Amino acid sequence: MNRMPGLAPVFLAALVGRLSYGTVALALVLTVRDTTGSYTSVGAVLALFGLTAAALAPVRAALIDRHGARRVLPVLAAPYAALLLLLACAGPRWLPLLAAVAGACAPPLGPVLRARLSELLGAGRWSLRGGRPLLARQLSGRVRASVDTASVICSSVRSARAVSRSRE
């Protein structure tokens, strides 16, 4: 098997960094429900988190294109981690604001990993998008991602309302 120099550190860093992505939604659901007792609040907080994460993804990608991932990712990751910790301790009044700001700070590890892999493996042969800058990659899939995000948010809000109504 051919070993690519520099591949293991990039892959391991992205793997560790992306572990929270799968658990953040569940953690938010449990935290907000325990804090407020309302599934409607859960839907609203998740919607704010998802909307700010999706809406500001091109801005974060442009920052990475302009200043580089090594400089921007730590600046995004530190407040993201701190805000997730604050969300676990915050009162009901602060949950929506903290969730929105946390979504705004969510580091775009997936696109950065894909861009770095394109550089390591050769853009012409392995790149899915032909070696375009990260912002171009982010925007090219943005319409599909926005539709997916909107449908998830709408279904979350509908589910939260249905559960809330059934409990009343």
Image: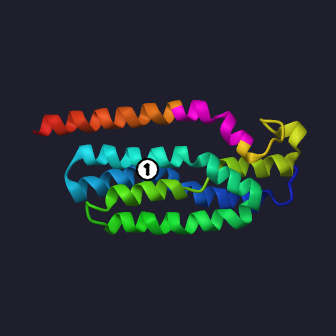
Give the left or right position of residue 50, taking residue 62 as reference.
left
Q: Which span of residues is magenta-colored?
A: 136-146
Residue 31 x, y percent position in the rendering: 31, 57
Give the left or right position of residue 55, taking residue 99 as reference.
right
Residue at 86 percent across and 54 percent down: it is: 3
Residue indicated by mark 1: 49
Residue 87 drawn above or below residue 161: below
Render colour scheme: rainbow
The residue closer to the viewer here, 95 or 162, is: 95
Residue 14 drawn above or below residue 115: below
Residue 86 x, y percent position in the rendering: 39, 68
Give the residue type at disc 1: Phe
The residue closer to the viewer here, 73 or 167, is: 73
Residue at 44 percent across and 30 percent down: it is: 151
Q: Residue 30 magenta-drawn? A: no
User: Around disc 1, counting alpha carbons within 10 Å, would you say few (fewer than 14), some (14 to 19), or many (20 or more)?
Assistant: many
Residue 34 x, y percent position in the rendering: 24, 57
Quarter of the view holding residue 156 = top left
Residue 72 drawn above or below residue 117: below
Residue 28 x, y percent position in the rendering: 36, 54
What predominant SS class does the magenta segment belong to?
A: helix
The residue closer to the viewer here, 60 or 35, is: 60
Residue at 63 percent across and 56 percent down: it is: 15
Give the left or right position of residue 71, taking residue 160 as reference.
right
**Farthest residue toward the left?**
168
Quarter of the view holding residue 76 = bottom right
Quarter of the view holding residue 128 = top right
Tally the numbered discs: 1
Say which quadrant the C terminus sits in.
Answer: top left
Tell me the element at label 1: helix
Give the left or right position of residue 65, taking residue 40 as reference.
right
